[in-house]
Image (tube, helix red, strand yellow):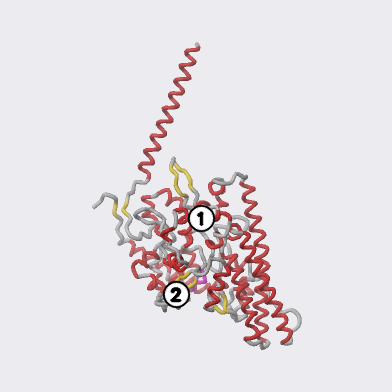
Amino acid sequence: MKNWILFGVTAIAVFLLAMLAYTIIDRKAEARFAYQPKVEIEGVEPRDSVWGLNYPRQYQSYMKTADTTFKSMYNTSGFADILDEQSELVVLWAGYGFGKDYNQPRGHVYAVADILKTLRTGAPMKEGDGPMPSTCWTCKSPDVPRLMKEMGATEFYSKQFSDLGSEVINPIGCADCHDPNTMNLTVTRPALIEAYEAMGKNINDASHQEMRSLVCAQCHVEYYFDKDKPGKEGANYLTFPWKDGMDVESAEAYYDKTDFADWVHPISKTRMLKAQHPDYELFQQGVHAKRGVSCADCHMPYKSEGGQKFTDHHIGSPLENVENSCFVCHREKVSDLVDDVYERQRKIKEGTSELQTLIAKAHIEAGKAWELGATKEQMKEIQKGIRHAQWRWDYSVASHGAAFHAPLETSRIVTSATRIIMESRLELMQLLNSLGHSGDVEMPDLNSKAALQEYTGIDIEKERYNKEKFLEEIVPKWMKEGKERESKMNVKEVGSK
């Protein structure tokens, strides 16, 4: 009896070992064929669907950036009208496109669709029309490196947004970050390479781990359009203000040195700065960057599927995927990790919300001072305070992840901006008193987006009407022309002649 039991146990063990060996061999065979290229990708191939033939798992995960269902305490992957939620921003951005329309960003797959829809890009009905230069396309599509290769970067920056409507039809994708021959991460936008050179550094010296952040830093940074770049006159040349440092004060000093302004505020008459999205700069000052973590580690964590390990290209908030994003290093409960993020965001949000209201009031009080006859000399330091306070506020909020990436630095920036605007408002009060005004300046309804857009001179109904006409008549034409152009681009199968 004992022998039969021993025989049975041995037979089961042999069977299980055989199954294990079969599985290992099967997975190895699958791995061997998983990344066998099916098509040859040459040059700058802007179509993700073509790359997807060779890298189906990465492509399929990228397509999940179309999912708009995620929602956290303050952010979402779907639609959210920021001006409706924080109406006082209409005053901060009076005279600038963001005062018309500002929504939370959606996934990369919507990059082209969303820039066409926003009121900020106007409604150009023919080539050369519209308020925006072609530089606004720079971070929206892999068609951009293709165009820069074909016509040169300076020529690309020298056109209008509407000139390239039928050329830019593919949203952010594979060719933005990957070399098609080696699949290595690569920088495809000249602005980042040039910013490194301005700092005396060579981006080719970057390690693979650094590249896992630098490919994101091609776009998730502070930048401006330099119209006076030596040798590039006439172009809206995309430039990073990193020459003297990457912190908020260094960029501020960089802009002040040349008296650069994105626009002049129509109420306070202040030369204003619009922060873009300095995610990379602020991330560099946080604990994760200091410990060698890259953007991709949290926003594109590795995952396994069918025994294959690959990078998840469903780029989004790590809060949507805490197990894969955070558990590589952290061992706390999901709820504890999420609560920790929310606590940082809540505390920063308290400061920025109060600050933006103070800045809105300062613009209106400055407008009152001008109305009562204030001189340029009397307003000089006050305008400087408004400029710096709003720049620092914008720097802290335009980087959507700042509260988590670098909470100490972000708090420091918000605190400094609050001090500056309070000092400016105190100077304004004294100036208004000297001009014969006593008491508080009458304010519009700072809680109504519609009232503030009317107050700042925006005809929002006209803007919407023109945009609808543009979307119905021009965009389909651009898309049709773009698709016809792409239909002539051959896709060669591997091994075919």
Find residue 495 and report its horizontal and vertical position in percent.
26, 49
121 magenta-colored: yes
- Which residue is rendered at x = 32% and y = 57% of the image? 42
Above or below for 264 versus 413: below
- Residue 132 is tagged as none
- Looking at the image, the residue that sits furthest to the right is 439
Q: Quadrant of residue 73?
A: bottom right
User: How many other residues sit within 10 Å of disc 2, few (<14), some (14-19) or many (≥20)?
Assistant: many
Find residue 170 and report its horizontal and vertical position in percent.
41, 62
Please report contact status of discs 2 and 1: CB closer than 8 Å, yes or no: no
Q: Which residues are magenta?
A: 118-123
Residue type at the position of mark 2: Asn
Which of these two is toward me, 296 or 164? 296
- Which residue is rendered at x = 69% and y = 73% of the image? 422
Number of numbered discs present? 2
- Which residue is rendered at x = 63% and y = 67% of the image? 86
Which of these two is toward me, 232 or 102? 232
Above or below for 380 versus 150: below
Find residue 255 and report its horizontal and vertical position in percent.
53, 74
Query: Could you give the CA–CA distance between mark 2 and mark 1, rounded to whole angstroms?
Result: 29 Å
Above or below for 128 versus 336: below
Label 2 or label 1, whichever lies nearer to me, is 1
Instruction: First in sequence, mark 2 or 1: give its number.
Output: 2
- Residue bearing mark 1: 295
Q: Secondary structure at mark 2?
A: loop
Q: Can residue 126 be seen from the camera position used here?
A: yes
Find residue 195 and report its horizontal and vertical position in percent.
46, 67
8 magenta-colored: no
- Looking at the image, the residue that sits furthest to the front is 200
Residue type at the position of mark 1: Cys
Q: Can residue 69 be seen from the camera position used here?
A: no
- Residue bearing mark 2: 236
